Image (spheres, coloured by chain):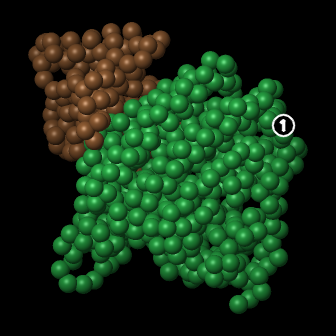
Chain colours: A brown, B green
């Protein structure tokens, strides 16, 4: 255990990790994120994730946002356990008929002001499950959506970009209020 | 006991190579099979409905062969198998919901996938307007000072939805009852009439964490039905992808299990390794989960010299970093205190349910489809299947640790002998109605796909059975007598798929 802690202190942080083709683009993204979060919003954001019928692929990439490479928390964005503590609802999946009510109730339990981000191709319009008797449609069919992040599933970088866009928009809205 | 019907048994390499002949059985024969299952003569691999029929897939472990029995139904009623053999119960309830078939004599006739929210009832059967449904009656638990704790469908973490009804005495769980079906997407019906490529797309989106294994199992079924010879190189690339998928899931889950025992550092370390696997997958096969890379007839992505180097470097890095993390797990008393003796599943239950994957292997069920109902290219590879006896959370962690090592070894073996050649064979309809069976060992256990194709090669019926069908019920048993606070830990050590189960 001590060894890992020591190693953690000595080793370069992973967030500056291996030279990969898109590292530079990501660093820019990270800087932009930090700026927007600080200047425009000046506070942290709590996110609640609701799976309304996904294949679980989108969840895996949302979970990846917490790993040391992406480390979402450093931007003051964190996942919370209750919709009552959330500012943002992230909703994945086509909305199944069996989940529609649970999604609506989760939305209702989230205090104002609130924002909804629909994640993944399914969340747009049902994706490859559209037209099924068991599907209501995309997230918009049940609750109002502020932003959609496409992909099947969107990778963590796309998720970060999407959330950055949301933070910027929130900042702009706050400025115009 | 009535005489067992003569079934057409097929050995594993044969059912992958040719269309699968289902055996028609009559009512007494069907009943006899149900009794034989209860007497542990065979293992139930699946039970599914069709228009005017019900089918069962059976596994004879000693002889390493598989059979499919089909009973034709004139009036939509069949003798319940679940009444003799509990593992069939939820499958029968699902068939009842989807087709309106009636399992006669069944003890539990509550709906399973149908929550009363669809506009049509029995969507794969007559498909009449849905009359709605009374509230779902949970099973009672009686005794002094019992209380109930309902959890879900929306859970606290970034996980899938399902409902858990705990009955507890103080902190101790007396009964857990699961209610699933929340993410039912109607995949069986979407499959009907679909082309093979559309079918493969849906199969790859049935359980996102097993997209490779599902696409492979589906493709196997299609290739068997149409007798397609898949190129050697494609087999090997498929196995590479499958082992990468297994690595990513095992690494992520080992970390997540430790995290549920409040040991967050392991999650951080393991999620780094997991991320490296996903990035390697993206660089080699062009997608972090390698989705849509396995297609009927072969694969849609090749591996070049650079990709090979990426994979070799990945294996080296895991071999370098993983052992010290395992050592850390094994030397942290506070962690073992949570995982040892928690969430035990008995050998008997695992055998009866034919539970696959690490859930089965951690409780003494020595079965891995890659070895015991083997398919190319695993027939040419060296694979040691880890088995434990203790059946607790710790045992499931250890099985997965050993499987990480095995996957590394398999990747190296595959890279060392990667034959050149084409990636894909054209898949043509045969002008006949054909049926095929696919069986692939995903990270969670064996995935079984039954596929029936019409004369033009379109899908008449496709039923995919996730390993979770035979694992979810065991979670109910595993948590009994444990404290509610250990449920997340037990649940994560199973990590059943909601989406794969709900379809
Ligand atoms: S968008 Fe793709 S990954 Fe996300 S839920 Fe839909 S099928 Fe799964």
Q: Position of residue B84 (x, y in %)?
A: 58, 81
Outermost residue toward the right? B431
Question: Between B343 and B225, which is closer to the camera in this rendering?
Answer: B343
Q: Is residue A164 visible?
A: yes
Question: Between B411 and B132, which is closer to the camera in this rendering?
Answer: B411
Vertical side of B310 occupied by B184: above or below? below
Q: Is residue B153 visible?
A: no
Name the chain under label 1. Answer: B
* B100 lies left or right of B256: right
Vertical side of A163 occupied by B57: above or below? below
Q: Residue at x 52, y 44 (%)?
A: B404
For label 1, the crowd category at 10 Å Cα-Cα, with few meaning under 14, some 14 to 19 and many 20 or more, is: few
Quadrant of res B165: bottom left
Q: Residue at x 61, y 77 (%)?
A: B81
Q: Ligand 1: does it lie within 8 Å of the C-beta at label 1?
A: no
Q: Residue at x 20, y 33 (%)?
A: A46
Question: Between B350 and B21, which is closer to the camera in this rendering?
Answer: B350
Q: Position of residue B477 (x, y in %)?
A: 40, 71
Q: Position of residue B367 (x, y in %)?
A: 62, 61
Q: Which residue is mark 1?
A: B428
Q: Judging from the image, what secondary structure is the residue with disc 1 in?
A: loop
């Amino acid at each position: 255990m001590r060894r890992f802690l020591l190693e953690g202190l000595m080793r370069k942080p992973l967030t500056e990790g291996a030279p990969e083709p898109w590292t530079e683009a990501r660093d820019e993204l990270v800087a932009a994120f930090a700026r927007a979060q600080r200047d425009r919003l000046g506070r942290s954001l709590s996110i609640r994730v609701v799976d309304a019928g996904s294949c679980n692929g989108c969840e895996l990439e949302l979970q990846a946002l917490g790993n040391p490479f992406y480390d979402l928390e450093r931007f003051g964005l964190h996942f919370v356990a209750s919709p009552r503590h959330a500012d943002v609802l992230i909703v994945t999946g086509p909305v199944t008929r069996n989940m529609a009510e649970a999604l609506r109730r989760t939305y209702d339990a989230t205090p104002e002001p609130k924002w909804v981000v629909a994640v993944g191709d399914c969340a747009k319009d049902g994706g490859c499950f559209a037209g099924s008797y068991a599907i209501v449609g995309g997230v918009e069919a049940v609750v109002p959506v502020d932003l959609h992040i496409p992909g099947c599933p969107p990778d963590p970088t796309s998720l970060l970009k999407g959330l950055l866009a949301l933070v910027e928009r929130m900042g702009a809205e706050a400025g115009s209020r | 006991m009535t005489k067992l019907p003569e079934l057409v048994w097929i050995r594993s390499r044969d059912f992958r190579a040719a269309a699968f002949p289902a055996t028609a059985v009559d009512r007494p024969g069907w009943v006899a099979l149900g009794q034989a299952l209860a007497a542990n003569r065979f293992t139930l691999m699946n039970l599914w409905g069709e228009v005017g029929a019900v089918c069962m897939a059976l596994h004879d472990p000693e002889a390493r062969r598989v059979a499919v029995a089909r009973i034709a139904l004139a009036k939509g009623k069949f003798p319940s198998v679940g009444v003799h053999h509990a593992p069939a119960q939820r499958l029968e309830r699902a068939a009842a919901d989807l087709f309106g078939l009636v399992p006669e004599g069944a003890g539990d006739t509550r709906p399973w996938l149908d929550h009363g929210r669809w506009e049509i009832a029995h969507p794969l059967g007559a498909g009449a307007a849905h009359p709605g449904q009374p509230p779902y009656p949970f099973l009672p638990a009686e005794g002094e000072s019992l209380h109930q704790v309902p959890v879900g469908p929306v859970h606290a973490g970034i996980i899938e939805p399902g409902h858990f009804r705990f009955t507890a005495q103080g902190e101790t769980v007396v009964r857990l009852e699961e209610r699933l079906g929340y993410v039912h997407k109607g995949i069986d019906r979407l499959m009907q009439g679909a082309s093979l490529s559309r079918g493969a797309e849906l199969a790859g989106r049935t359980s996102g964490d097993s997209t490779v294994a599902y696409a492979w199992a589906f493709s196997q079924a299609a290739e068997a039905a149409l007798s397609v010879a898949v190129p050697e190189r494609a087999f090997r690339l498929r196995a590479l992808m499958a082992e990468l998928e297994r690595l990513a899931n095992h690494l992520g889950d080992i970390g997540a299990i430790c995290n549920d025992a409040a040991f967050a550092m392991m999650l951080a370390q393991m999620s780094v390794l997991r991320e490296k696997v996903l990035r390697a997958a993206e660089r080699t096969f062009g997608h972090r989960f390698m989705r849509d890379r396995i297609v009927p007839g072969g694969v849609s992505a090749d591996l070049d010299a650079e990709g090979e180097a990426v994979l070799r470097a990945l294996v080296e890095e895991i071999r370098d970093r993983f052992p010290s993390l395992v050592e850390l797990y094994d030397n942290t008393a506070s962690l073992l205190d949570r995982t040892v003796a928690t969430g035990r599943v008995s050998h008997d239950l695992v055998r009866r349910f034919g539970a696959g994957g690490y859930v089965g292997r951690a409780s003494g069920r020595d079965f891995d489809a890659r070895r015991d109902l083997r398919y190319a290219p695993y027939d040419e590879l060296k694979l040691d299947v880890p088995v434990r006896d203790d059946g607790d959370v710790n045992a499931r962690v250890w099985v997965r640790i050993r499987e990480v090592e095995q996957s590394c070894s398999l990747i190296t073996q595959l890279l060392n002998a990667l034959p050149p050649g084409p990636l894909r064979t054209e898949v043509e309809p045969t002008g006949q109605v054909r049926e095929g069976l696919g069986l692939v060992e995903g990270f969670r256990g064996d995935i079984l796909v039954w596929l029936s194709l019409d004369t033009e090669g379109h899908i008449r019926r496709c039923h995919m059975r996730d390993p979770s069908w035979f694992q979810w019920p065991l979670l109910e048993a595993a948590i009994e007598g444990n404290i509610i606070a250990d449920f997340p830990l037990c649940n994560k050590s199973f990590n059943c798929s909601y989406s794969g189960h709900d379809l």
